[in-house]
Image (tube, grey):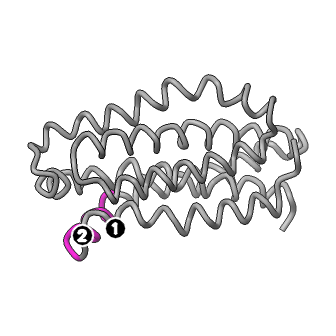
Amino acid sequence: MRRSQIVPLVVATALFMENTDSTVIATALPSIAASLGEDPIALKLALTAYLVSLAIFIPISGWMADRYGARPIFRAALVVFMAGSLACAASNSLTGFGAARLLQGLGGAMMVPVGRLVILRSVPKSELVSALAYLTIPALIGPIMGPPLGGLITTSLDWRWIFFINIPIGIAGIVLSTMYFEDL
């Protein structure tokens, strides 16, 4: 495989993880609410915390990539997203769950824009359209897989497992970005 194919696929791991995570939670909300002793409507706080975090931190992601390098920021974003996922799984209260989703949103806000920046900086302009296709197609699978996967996990296991699925995907993203991303 050429670098112009590998780099977008590595970025796609992050986008896949973020898209799957945002849809997998929808089917698990009643189980999460019951476990936390909350009304399912109260979990809007956790969903909103994630979106607010994205809105706040996406604008600074480009600046951070320029200042500290795209590869280190991308890897740090994956680590923060995974830490947020683990914190979500460990949550025992609505406040803790909301704070964990805020942390997860911080990681998500950095992953995707910085990943796209890596693609733009490392793929020749003549191959950019096909590179973006390599990014987009795997990323579109996440929202399709999320709800059935969330339902399966929630009925077969505990709801906390929906957040553990991010860990192997995130680790793969860190390893692959270390191997294939240049210091940009």
Image quadrant for the C terminus? top right
Q: Which residues are magenta?
A: 147-156
Q: Is residue 76 left or right of residue 153?
A: right
Task: Tell me the SS state at disc 1.
Answer: helix
Image quadrant for the N terminus? bottom right
Residue that carries the numbered disc 1 in the rendered image: 161
| Residue 34 at x, y percent in the picture | 11, 55
| Residue 91 at x, y percent in the picture | 29, 53
> Splitting the image into 4 quarters, where does residue 48 fall?
top left
Q: Is residue 183 left or right of residue 148?
A: right
Residue that carries the numbered disc 2 in the rendered image: 158
Question: Who's the residue at 15% across and 58% down the image?
Answer: 35
Magenta span: predominant SS is helix
Residue 92 within the magenta-colored segment of the rendering: no
- Camera-side residue: 97 or 183? 97
| Residue 40 at x, y percent in the picture | 13, 44
Residue found farthest to the bottom: 156
> Measured along the vertical axis of the image, is residue 120 above or below residue 80?
above
Q: Is residue 14 left or right of residue 73?
A: left
> Splitting the image into 4 quarters, where does residue 156 fall?
bottom left
Q: Which kind of residue does numbered mark 2 sit on?
A: Asp
Question: Who's the residue at 39% across and 60% down the image?
Answer: 163
Question: Who's the residue at 88% across and 51% down the image?
Answer: 182
